[in-house]
Image (cartoon, helix red, strand yellow):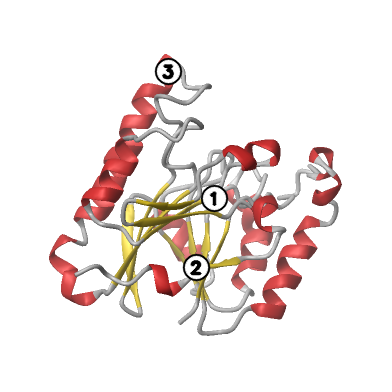
Amino acid sequence: MRIFAIGDLHLEGGTGKRMDMFGENWVGHDSKIFEAWERIGREDDLLLLLGDLTWAMRFEQALPDLERVGRMKGLKLMLKGNHDYWWKTVGKMQRALHPSIKLIQGSSIIVDRVAIAGTRGWLCPSDEYFREQDEPLYRREVGRLGLALQSLEKLGGEYDALIVAMHYPPMSDKHEPSGFTELIDEFRADACVFGHVHGEAIKHTFTGMRNATMYYLASADAIDFSPARIDMNFIRRKE
């Protein structure tokens, strides 16, 4: 099984909202993403979708975009992003979605002996834009990641690698530790993959090895609108 990731598809969702206002690289971005996956994807691949899937405001409005994702090759694991206002309870959505789409929101799943624990995340306390009102949201998301990882504690024999998937980066723009990175270190995650970051901020976002974990930024414009492959050489469970 190959593993790929991409976040921030920002599909139109019937709203008429276009992304090319953010730069020429966003012109026709949805076609770039789907054509890239049609070219490189296989039916036995795993694709992590890291939030901000569509601009739709209601679940019913999001369904055409979700159906389009359902037709993509492989198994898709989907996270909630900060712009996914259409998101409803996991149970309700799961019943309506294509069977190749699974939701991970403060939860975990094991696929072909790879464990994936996921949550949306939030701004970290040392971030330039963090405000007092962000504190409870940050703490709630740290708690959700903790629960997702704890759900794997008794299943160590069932997986060989652990990936933490988030929408927000797990550390601030200053690259300082957070409650997220503490959990990532505690549970010895092999990789952490996230999106959310765009434009000039891509240059200032931490990627690469930190302690025992490889950090990947996979927002759509950071990876040229083509799902990024997660190198399995970096995500073998440490002895």
x then y, percent, for residue 8 = 62, 50
x then y, percent, for residue 81 = 53, 44
Q: Quadrant of residue 4?
A: bottom right
Q: Are marks 2 and 3 in contact (CB under 8 Å)?
A: no
Disc with the residue nearer the chain's start (2 vs 3): 3
Mark seen at residue 51: 1
- Horizontal side, residue 201 vs residue 190: left or right: right
SS for callout 3: helix
Q: Are marks 3 and 1 in contact (CB under 8 Å)?
A: no
x then y, percent, for residue 48 = 50, 63
Instruction: Identify the residue shown where x is 71% and y is 52%.
Output: 11
x then y, percent, for residue 58 = 61, 44
- Horizontal side, residue 107 vs residue 170: left or right: left
- Residue behind mark 2: 230
Type of the residue with mark 1 = Gly
- Classify mark 2: residues with Cα within 10 Å, few (<14), some (14-19) or many (20+): many
Above or below, 134 relative to 19: above
Disc with the residue nearer the chain's start (2 vs 1): 1
